[in-house]
Image (tube, rainbow, N blue to C red):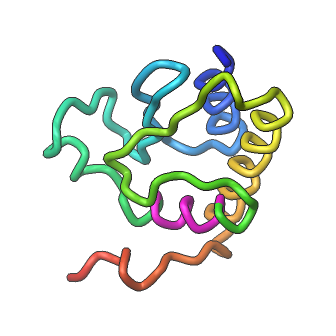
């Protein structure tokens, strides 16, 4: 279980995504931001929430469910096996690659209004 944040960080580095990981291995946030720290709502509001919405859809397309609200954390527990972890990290890698390639879908309700 301790590999969840490092594994996620490695995927972000491999795909050259600028993300911030906040939390502990069992409960953490993945934030699309150049900020070094996020402490409060105003910091979170500066994150790329549209990109997170696209990640949510992409992970669902690859069989991984995360909360659609970027204020919520990713959770893991003892019931998650190493195979679950590998599938999740593979889905994350593919989802981030799809977003970067511009083939990810951002649902209309998540697009920011000008």
Give me the residue at 60% from left, 55% from top.
65
| Outermost residue toward the front in this view | 79
Residue 23: where, in percent of width, then height? 41, 23
Judge left or right: residue 59 versus residue 27: right
The residue lying furthest to the top in this view is 2
Expressed as whole percent of the image width and height from the top left, the position of residue 78 reads 67, 22
Q: Quadrant of the N terminus?
A: top right
Q: Which residues are magenta?
A: 52-59
Tell how many labels.
0
Q: Is residue 63 above or below residue 47?
A: below
Task: Name the quarter where the C terminus is drawn.
Answer: bottom left
Query: Which of the pair 4/113 is nearer the observer?
Result: 4
Q: Position of residue 71 (x, y in %)?
A: 31, 47
Q: Kindly indicate the quadrant of the structure image that contains residue 35.
A: top left
Question: Is residue 38 a member of the stretch shown in magenta?
Answer: no
Residue drawn at 75 percent across, 51 percent down: 91
State the residue in front, 44 or 59.
59
Looking at the image, residue 91 lies above or below residue 51: above
Give yes or no for residue 57 being in the magenta stretch: yes
- In the displayed structure, does residue 12 sit left or right of residue 41? right
Q: Residue 61 appears at what percent x and percent y?
A: 71, 68
Q: Is residue 98 above or below residue 23?
A: below
Instruction: Please determine whether, in this image, residue 66 is positioned above or below residue 40.
Output: below
- Main secondary structure along the magenta-highlighted residues: helix
Q: Is residue 32 left or right of residue 56?
A: left
Residue shown at 65% from the left, 34% from the top:
13
- Seen in the image, is 66 located left or right of residue 40? right
Residue placed most toward the observer, 87 or 44 = 87
């Amino acid at each position: 279980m301790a590999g969840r944040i490092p594994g996620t960080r490695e995927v972000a580095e491999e795909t050259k995504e600028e993300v911030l990981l906040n939390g502990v291995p069992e409960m953490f946030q993945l934030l699309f931001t150049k900020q070094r720290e996020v402490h409060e709502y105003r910091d979170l509001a500066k994150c790329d929430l549209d990109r997170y919405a696209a990640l949510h859809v992409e992970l669902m397309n690859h069989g991984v469910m995360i909360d659609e609200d970027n204020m919520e954390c990713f959770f893991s527990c003892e019931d998650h096996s190493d195979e679950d972890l590998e599938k999740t990290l593979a889905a994350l890698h593919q989802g981030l690659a799809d977003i970067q390639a511009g083939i990810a879908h951002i649902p209309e309700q998540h697009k920011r209004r000008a």
